[in-house]
Amino acid sequence: MIVSETERLRIRAWKESDRDLFFEINNDAKVMEFFPHRRSRQESDALFDRVGRGIAETGLGFFAVALKADDRPIGFCGLAYTDLEPHMPKGTVEIGWRLAAPFWGKGYITEAALDLLRYGFDEKDLREIVSFAIPENTRSTAVMARLRMHRDPARDFDHPRIPADKPQLARHVLYAITRADWQSQRAKTGA
């Protein structure tokens, strides 16, 4: 299933042959710098299967991002339902991403995420999309700003699944964009 294509990228469901890349990004110390732990091969494979099932069941999830020229996966970007009650109500959809380090700094995540905002608002009729990260993860918060998401300090939260021995990773800042904001921005730019 191909969700969308941009100028340089294909956003699609995962293929069995993508497992190695999925493990690479979930086990890389640089990529996982702001997460509580890197995943073992077994943990990564279990997450790969869970993500695939979620996409099949809901049409949302963390999709593979592949180079359009050769369909080589380079990471993921997607829209997924959060399960962070009471911090976010049931039904809240987040946009998130992870990219193999050799592909950083080329604008790939911004390109994929912009297209997924369009997909979420125009095709899935979502009312709001959020994203969150620890404040020190300036690469991700910079993407959120480039997506014209708005920081909402009143909704910052301590992530409930961060282990007690990693308190520096608990506090998360939240950014959000509504369908009305998205439509207004598109009208201004003529996109």
Image (cartoon, rainbow, N blue to C red):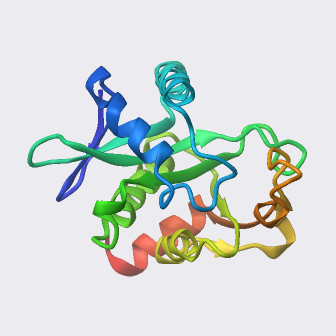
Front-most of 65 and 128? 65
Does residue 80 appear left or right of residue 16 in this picture? right
**Residue at horizontal 70%, vertical 41%?**
82
Please identify the residue farthest to the bottom as the structure is shown: 188
Q: Does residue 126 appear left or right of residue 62 in this picture?
A: right
In this view, 36 is above or below 56: below
The answer to whether residue 77 is visible is no
Image quadrant where one finds the C terminus: bottom left
Asked if residue 4 is positioned above or below residue 135 in the image, the reply reads above
- Residue 160 spot, x, y in % from top left: 85, 47
* Residue at 42% in and 58% down: 113
Nearer-the-camera pick, 32 or 150: 32
Image: 170 above or below 68: below
Which residue is at the front of the view, 108 or 130? Answer: 108
Residue at the image point whose x is 49% and y is 44% from the top:
27
Whether residue 152 is visible to the viewer of this picture, yes or no, is yes
Is the residue 92 above or below the residue 136 in the image?
Answer: above
What is the x, y in percent for residue 146? 46, 76
Disc tally is 0
> Residue 9: x and y, percent?
23, 52
Quadrant where the N terminus lies? top left
Q: Quadrant of residue 58?
A: top right
